[in-house]
Amino acid sequence: MSSNVEVEAVLQGWQENPNLAPNFIFATSIPKVDPTYSEIPSDLHPDLVAALRATGIHQLYSHQRTAWNTAAAGKNMVITSGTASGKSLCYYLPILNELLLNPSARALLLFPTKALAQDQLNKLLALVDLIPAANIPCATYDGDTSSLHRRAIRESARILITNPDMLHLGILPHHTQWEAFFSGLRFVVIDEIHTYRGVFGSHVANVMRRLDRVANFYHSRLKFYMTSATIGNAAELAAKLTGSQAVLIEEDGAGHGEKAFFIYNPPLVNERLGIRKSAIYEAVEISNSLLQQKTQTIIFTITRRSVELTLAALQHAYPSHAARVRGYRSGYLPQDRREIEGGLRNNQVSTVVATSALELGIDIGALDAAVLVGYPGTIASTTQQIGRAGRKAQKSLAVLIATPEPIDQFLARNPAYFLGLSPEQALIDPDNLSILINHLQCAAFELPFTDNDTYGTLARDDLYGLLEFLTEKGILHHSGGQYTWMQSNYPSATLSLRSASADRVDLKRLSGDTWEVFGTVDRVSAYWMVHPEAIYLHEAVTYRVDELNLTDNYAHLTRVSEDYYTEPREALSIEILSRVEEVTHAGFQLGRGELEVTNQVTGYRKIKNHSREILGVGSVDLPAYTFDTTGFWMVIDPTSVEKLRLAGKWLNDPNDYGADWDAIRLAVRQRDNNTCQNCGKTFGMEPLHVHHIVPFRLFSSAAEANQAGNLVTLCPDCHRRAEERAYVRSGLTGLAYAMRHLLPFHLMCDSRDLDVHADPICTLFDLQPAIIGFDSTPGGIGLAYAAYQKIPALLPELLKFIQQCPCADGCPSCIGPAGEEGYGGKAETLAILELITHG
Amino acid sequence: MDDSLKARLNRLGIKTGADEIAAPPVHSGEFSIETVIPGEIIQSVFGPCYRIRKEFDKSHAHGSLSLMIEGEIGLVADWAQLSPAGRSSLEDFVYLDTETTGLSGGAGSFAFLVGLSRYKAGGTEFTQFLLRDPSEERGMLTALSEYMHGAHGVVTYNGKAFDIPLLNSRYVLHRLESPFTDLDHIDLLHLARRMWKKKLASRRLSNVETEILRVERGQDEVPGYLVPQMYFDYLKTRDARPLAGVLYHNEMDVLSMAALLNYFTINLTRSEVPVSASPDDYYPLVSLLLDLGRNDEASKIFLSVFKPAEHSQSVDWDVARRIGNVYRRAADWEHAVMVYQAAADNYQEFGWGELAKYYEHVARNYDGALYYAESQLKYVAALDLGPFTMQQKLKEIQKRIDRIKIRQKNSPV
């Protein structure tokens, strides 16, 4: 562990490095906070008190005491204190206390991953072992549990550790074999509830509803104890997940040393095109001082691929320190993880490189420095990752290195977001029809529904409407006052909690001469993730898709080593099913409602890694896919369009089209017979306009711009309309790009959960230009509606953000690479934004 | 139901399989179970239940066998580890087989038909409880409990893994006590596996029936995998006529179990093995007898079938090894050496190993011991073993060789 002296030396190293110093664009310091303690409760079981003392704990942090008090009052709770603040003791104390007093009581602990569950078991066992008289068998129960042990665990485990997928698939459908367990079940712990958002969270909420039904059958009333990272709506999420209210415990009594936080923006190497130095190489440069001082550091990267790249770069740059730098992946065996953790503790390892999997609380202890290569996608994740650095009394460091992603660049220029503001809310919609209907079937399989039944907070009419629907379809049989499952399969077997649709596509690769399955994707994602010729990354290995078979639901992939990735091109068509709400703003109309979306992947682009050059295109022949969802739209009204045209004309009309312009114009009119090439009107001797198809300003020379193929004769009306279209198209596309990248940030969702498209001549809105966004989950889970609420406030932010981008005419960090759709578009995008924000 | 909800659900395209097939006509009472299937409605404590009953005289033959127990029960009772009470009252055991709505278990699968058989004075009484509707399950489970009253055990085919756990699950769901707790259980599938792993391609009851019991099922038979759907169809159409096939299938399953238990009581306790006997029939029996500690019986049968010179490929050398060791432990050297010699002649490693030990420690014939130890070494060295295992084994054998050589040198010529 480093002392303050070493940490200061690191800072000095950065300051003195001319390649680094100017790029630290933001610095702030979070002052030291002393811990707030509270007495160990006097009514805590004496064996537990002794056990705590044996681990060196003689008093509790304030939030641990508050948790005890809350549990004692019989309430559910959600605790949001930071990393390494002893959150687990908040639930272990009330649970172990009750289990010691009441020999039939049991507890269920849910963790998001198997690895985390395994680590927690070890932690728990260490504590329980210190209570000699305790008869509290603890066990994990998941896909890896051997069949020999399963029976014993079912009958006698009193603390069961598992994950939501296992609960859904392996426990609830067989609950009669768990009679003893459910009869005594008193407590359910759900750890890291902020990970249960979006589609996954909506599924888990339904699994909780089913758990509630089953517990109820065995006459057990459950208490829910939850933990979460700091999000904007922890209490609300807790309530939606469990169906009942929970007390929010936000205080953090653990205290921490001083924390220095920096944002580092790699310098531009090409200002015009907006290209910056690679974030990974900057991380390597930053690591120099850290390694010199042997500062215990964790480097987070976004993808597993980047872990490998970063590791390799570090080992290459600092060969003498190579043994002190280790990678950490969730796929590692427990003994490997123990080894690395041990290495950190005894200072043989000073730097660990990992993906965000590590943020899920695996017990690696606290470190001195955290370096984030790229914004991890949410403030909550960022706070957690930064929180990995920070000893109790020592000073610690955290650096966020921005990548060219728009969100990263946005944050680099708006660092205030880190200072206490938390714009993210974790959104889930347990009543999303496509998710709900599947879980209702699972619930009916587990316990038949009676004529007077409930299902979580679902309205009675909705419940019976759905049950009747399932009965009509022959899935349930209604007689004698109950709805009985009427199929010979069992429903959980085909339902994955991590996708919206139940259909999966198997990914197969050749092993010898057989095709073996090495992964799956859900069918909806398969169209754009594994279309023929797509590049697919799996566990840091690159594959190319050779075949996608949608009849038999598999894809054949071959391992390749290419330095490009693919981006699918999709043809989209949208129908509006219902307009729920519409509002007129100055310059545009904003609305929301239900949409029918038809999507078809028609081709793809090959994009080079790192540089993002477009290497080529390909076409693909796949069927279209249709689904219903919720969406929002922004329609630019005609007066704005006209103002845009004037603005655009001004932007695009140079004073000088080159020396030969008059002669060229004449030649073109003659070629075209002085006839408008669009509407066919001819004006006899009166000269018509000559229009540049690709705008003049995009060429590097007048000669290129003025080539005959780029010029066309148009009448004044058609010319005006063509200009409009050109300006509007590029401006609208740029705006949609910026929204598509920045909305997910504000909604705390995965960027794939929300789709945003621009249509300059939208048939849904009388051919006016429109931007349409929708939830990519069938049925919608509330993201588009949340976007609808946020857009008016977001537009001025977007304007400022794009204005501040140093690029000349558009770049991937703001409105899309120059040359997208054939136009730069930055000026046009700004023009649109200025119009609709200022009216 | 709200129209828009229905419309949205339909657009979601919930897969139901038979959507396109027109809904079958619903018969009202015309072909109900009561009308079409001879039986009676009985009242149990918790409601009505439909019961079908048949009697079989003790002379009734099922295939080539009687349904009565004709042989000795002792060996089967030992194998099944029956309690003393159960052992002495096999005539109170109940044969049981269910037909269910799902073949992979889980809380949503239930038994719509339970077939049972027990011995009554002078013959067999066969009973079936059939659910006219899932809402009658409580009544059926109580009737089943009443039926099981006084029984000391059950006989099933795969009942330990499937039928009994499924029925127990139903009792839990109805908050009733299961009649199967603490009952003795003879699961004939496990015995069939022991006996016929090599001889039969499959130990499914239908195959055992054909090959061993010589039973042929009639036209009414329906294959097991169709059964759940046939019940679902009945629930929709209320046409019980196709269920006759399910009832027949269930009846045959139960009766075959009785015949099979009879078969085992006759054939497993043979002390004389027919000259024409197939070794595949008898090595598993030897192994079973050894497991039960009946070494003399095992030896007798073994010696009748062990013909390594004529039928070397049919010899179960694992069984031979175990028998050899039995002889060795009893100091029956004549038989032990005979077995080991045959093994060595047939390149079974244990043959050389045991003979080397015998010649060294018992016969004190060091030349012989050396010959066999060296043969073993040569054999093992040519095997495809992992380097560590190979090293260990060779070390052991070499140690013996060295020791024998020393003894050879020191022994009086």
Image: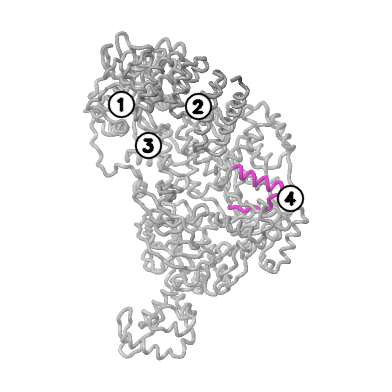
Q: Residues within 10 Å of mark 3 (few under 14, many from 20)?
A: some
Q: Residues within 10 Å of mark 1 (few under 14, many from 20)?
A: many
Residue contact between numbered discs 1 and 2, judged by CB atoms under 8 Å: no
The chain carrying label 2 is: B
Q: Which residues are magenta?
A: A334-355
Nearer to us of marks 3 and 4 is 4
The chain carrying label 3 is: A
Nearer to us of marks 4 and 2 is 2
Task: Identify which residue, B300 or B377, lies in the foreground.
Answer: B377
Inspect this view and state whether residue A77 appears. Answer: yes
Q: CA distance from mark 1 to mark 2?
A: 67 Å
Q: CA distance from mark 3 to mark 4?
A: 56 Å
- Which residue is at 49% across, 41% downward? A165
Q: Residue B40: x, y in percent? A: 28, 19
Secondary structure beneath label 3:
loop
Task: Name the mark on residue A324.
Answer: none
Residue at image mark 1: B132
Q: Quadrant of residue B360?
A: top right
Going by the picture, which residue comes out furthest to the top? B121
Nearer to us of marks 3 and 1 is 3
The chain carrying label 1 is: B
Say what amino acid the circle numbered 3 marks: Asn
Secondary structure beneath label 4:
loop
Tell me which label, 3 or 4, sits earlier in the chain.
Answer: 4
Tell me which label, 1 or 2, sits earlier in the chain.
Answer: 1
